[in-house]
Image (cartoon, rainbow, N blue to C red):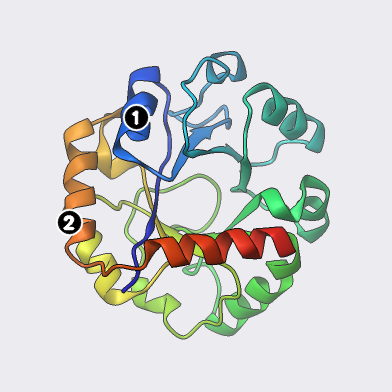
Amino acid sequence: MAEKFVKVCGLTRAEDMAFCHDLGIDYTGMIFVEKSPRFILPSCAVHMPKGQARRVGVFAGASLETIREVGQKADLDLIQLHGSEDVEFCRHVGAERVIKVLWPERLEQDELQLEIRRFAPVCTYYLFDAGMMGGGSGKTLQWSLLNRLDIPRPWFVAGGIGPVNIQDVLLNCDPSGIDMNSAVENAPGVKNLELIQQALVQLKRVEKPGRQNEMQSVCSLEKRV
């Protein structure tokens, strides 16, 4: 099993963001959905520390104008679309920037496969989340649902992933990356740094060397999109 990308989402505090950079986290996520308990104001996101991690902004139901404005202000690298945004919307955001969220529990497998194919030209990553729609539920997905799918882009899994179950996730499916949020918190938006470290330790126990090659492969894919 190749080494996995790691994304920590729902970051609201500068000290948590800085800690993720120190740990070498690959992607840091900030949520710009007002109803979320992890909502961060764009004016605050501007001051979040920058590092080598790619900055991801999470949106659901926002206008293109809002996404572009916040993306520029917060210096976002990627836009995670967590709502019902369609193919045309993703195309306007820019395929090279889009992480498209899909919900395996909401669709039959053949319907999910059609959705994956439909969004392939307009996204760079997929993220498969637990629940039925909208914001992250924090619930655990039935990971085996993903095993029979043809997924033409790198993909993340999300939904209550932390040190307790991260090995189980990887034993039941083989994603490109892990997205952690609620299971590594003391409270919404307040990360538990020890739990993040513990999750990384558990992750390394089931990985094999190969991260450099995988990262190069993804970078090449992004250039072709």
Which picture quadrant has residue 60? top right
Which picture quadrant has residue 186? top left
Residue 160 vs residue 126: left or right? left
* Mark 2 lies on residue: 202
- Looking at the rendered structure, the kind of residue marked 2 is Gln
- Looking at the rendered structure, the kind of residue marked 1 is Pro
Residue 6: x and y in percent read 38, 50
Q: Secondary structure at mark 1?
A: loop
Q: Which mark is residue 188?
A: 1
Look at 35% across and 41% down and name the residue there. Answer: 24
Residue 146 vs residue 161: left or right? right
Q: Is residue 38 visible?
A: yes
Q: Which mark is residue 114?
A: none
Q: Is residue 176 visible?
A: no
Residue 69: x and y in percent read 75, 26
Q: Between 161 and 176, which is closer to the camera in this rendering?
A: 176
Which picture quadrant has residue 190? top left
Q: Between 52 and 135, which is closer to the camera in this rendering?
A: 52
Q: Between 142 and 127, which is closer to the camera in this rendering?
A: 127
